[in-house]
């Protein structure tokens, strides 16, 4: 009697989920698997480039079925609304899909509920449509405020200022932008702000977003025609509601092999996973997300082949930051993402960033032909929202 296929469901087609899916298709094609990828949209969104779309630039849009063509992976366009770990099934828009192994890769989004008015009056970069909606508001605006001094906020503010020099762009944040950089790289970043005319207001906390600006914790306020909110990160509560062990941010706590510590049939990767290393817990970036997806594919294939699990090992390499299209700064880092002395600026930094942050489509095409390991991918991408 023929053995039924091992059913693998990948929840989420972001950087990590897509890498896991492509890797699984390559590594398990002779192991009798049935792979299903579930995502709310049929479009693959390059989050690293949403700030460019927000500034009004036209970039290629990739369709997930096209990326998966020829892999044998079944794609389902839908949103996972629940997980039943006892039954081993996920609910996709009221329909249930059973699994033997689940790869939880639902990603994260900019938080909009913590500060009053954000959901009603601010724009975010939570997806392609959100970025396009923000871009559509710029032609009729004069004052743009970007809230959040992480790398997403920095790149969005500088991109908008360079693409729309008539706009008055202000970057507001609780902590000074570039605090994760060394002093020389940070100085270059601030010279970029000055060159592009971005007004930086650090050390202030926004308490409310209004239709015409923001209120601050010190009682002051700033006027703005358009507000872009990039501060704070949240993950869907689906994993916690299902009874999986989660951390204080709602991320699935994993063991050393990226399996849920409470439900080993579930692997968690990318922003939705709390992956601990000797130096601390990985934070959400493309730089770490793609390697977790590649590693999960390796480990699931090893598990199906009856091999012992191996530990995931990761360390950060760099913080690549664009300052518009004509400038950049690269801060090289230790494994825990603290800055080294080495950094790049100007043209060398632009070329470096173009290389390490190039479209992952090329990586996925390579992974379809070769067994790409997590270690090979450890230097790609890298952006923190917080």
Image (cartoon, helix red, strand yellow):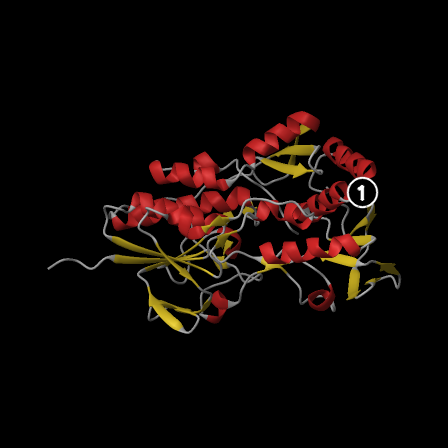
Q: Which residue is labeled 1 in the image?
A: 165
Number of disc labels:
1
The residue sitting at the left extreme is 1
Query: Residue 195: horizontal and vertical position, in percent?
Result: 82, 35
Question: Hey, which quadrant is residue 122 in on the image?
Answer: bottom right
Residue 322 higher or lower than 349, as above or below: below
Point 71% across, 34% down: residue: 182
Query: Relative to the observer, which residue lies in front, 1 or 347?
Result: 347
Left or right: residue 221 versus residue 155 is right
Residue 340 higher or lower than 272, as above or below: above
Looking at the rendered structure, the secondary structure element under dot 1 is: loop
Left or right: residue 373 versus residue 271 is left
Point 76% across, 53% down: residue: 139
The quarter of the rendered structure image containing the N terminus is bottom left
Crowding at dot 1, Cα within 10 Å, few <14 / some 14-19 / many 20+, comes out as few
Query: Residue 180: horizontal and vertical position, in percent?
Result: 69, 41
Query: Residue 126: horizontal and vertical position, in percent?
Result: 61, 57
Query: Residue 334: horizontal and vertical position, in percent?
Result: 59, 35
The residue sitting at the bottom extreme is 94
Residue 301 higher or lower than 104, as above or below: above
Question: Hey, which quadrant is residue 8 in on the image?
Answer: bottom left
Left or right: residue 31 versus residue 51 is left
User: Is residue 296 in sight in this rendering?
Assistant: no
The residue sitting at the top extreme is 348
User: Is residue 23 in sight in this rendering?
Assistant: yes
Point 52% across, 56% down: residue: 107
């Amino acid at each position: 009697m023929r053995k039924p296929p091992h059913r693998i469901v990948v929840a989420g087609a972001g950087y990590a989920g897509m890498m896991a899916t492509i890797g699984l298709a390559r590594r398990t094609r002779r192991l009798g698997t049935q792979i299903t990828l579930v995502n709310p949209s049929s479009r693959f969104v390059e989050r690293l480039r949403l700030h460019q779309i927000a500034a009004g630039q036209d970039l290629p849009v990739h369709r997930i079925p096209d990326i998966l063509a020829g892999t044998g992976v079944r794609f389902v366009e839908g949103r996972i609304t629940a997980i039943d770990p006892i039954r081993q099934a996920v609910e996709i828009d009221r329909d249930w899909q059973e699994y033997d192994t689940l790869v939880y890769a639902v990603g994260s989004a900019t938080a909009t509920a913590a500060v009053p008015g954000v959901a009603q009056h601010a724009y975010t970069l939570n997806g392609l449509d959100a970025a396009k909606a923000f871009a559509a508001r710029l032609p009729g605006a004069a004052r743009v405020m970007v809230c959040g001094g992480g790398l997403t906020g920095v790149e969005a503010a500088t991109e908008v200022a360079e693409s729309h020099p008539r706009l008055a762009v202000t970057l507001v944040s609780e902590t000074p932008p570039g605090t994760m950089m060394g002093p020389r790289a940070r100085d270059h970043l601030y010279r970029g702000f000055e060159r592009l005319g971005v007004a930086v207001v650090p050390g202030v906390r926004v308490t409310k977003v209004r239709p015409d600006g923001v209120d601050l914790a010190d009682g002051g306020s700033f006027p703005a025609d358009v507000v872009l909110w990039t501060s704070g990160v949240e993950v869907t509560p689906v994993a916690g509601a299902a009874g999986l062990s989660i951390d204080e941010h709602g991320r699935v706590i994993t063991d050393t092999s990226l399996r849920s510590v409470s439900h080993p049939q579930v692997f968690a990767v990318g922003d939705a996973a709390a992956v601990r290393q000797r130096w601390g817990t990985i934070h959400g970036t493309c730089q770490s997300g793609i390697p977790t997806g590649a590693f999960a594919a390796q480990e699931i294939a090893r598990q199906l082949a009856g091999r012992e699990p191996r530990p995931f090992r990761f360390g950060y390499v760099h913080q690549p930051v664009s300052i518009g299209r004509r400038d950049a700064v690269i801060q090289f880092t230790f494994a825990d993402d603290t800055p080294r002395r080495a950094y790049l600026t100007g043209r060398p930094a632009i070329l470096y960033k173009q290389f390490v942050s190039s479209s992952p489509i090329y990586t996925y095409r390579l992974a379809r032909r070769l067994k790409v390991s997590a270690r090979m991918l450890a230097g790609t991408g890298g952006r923190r929202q917080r």
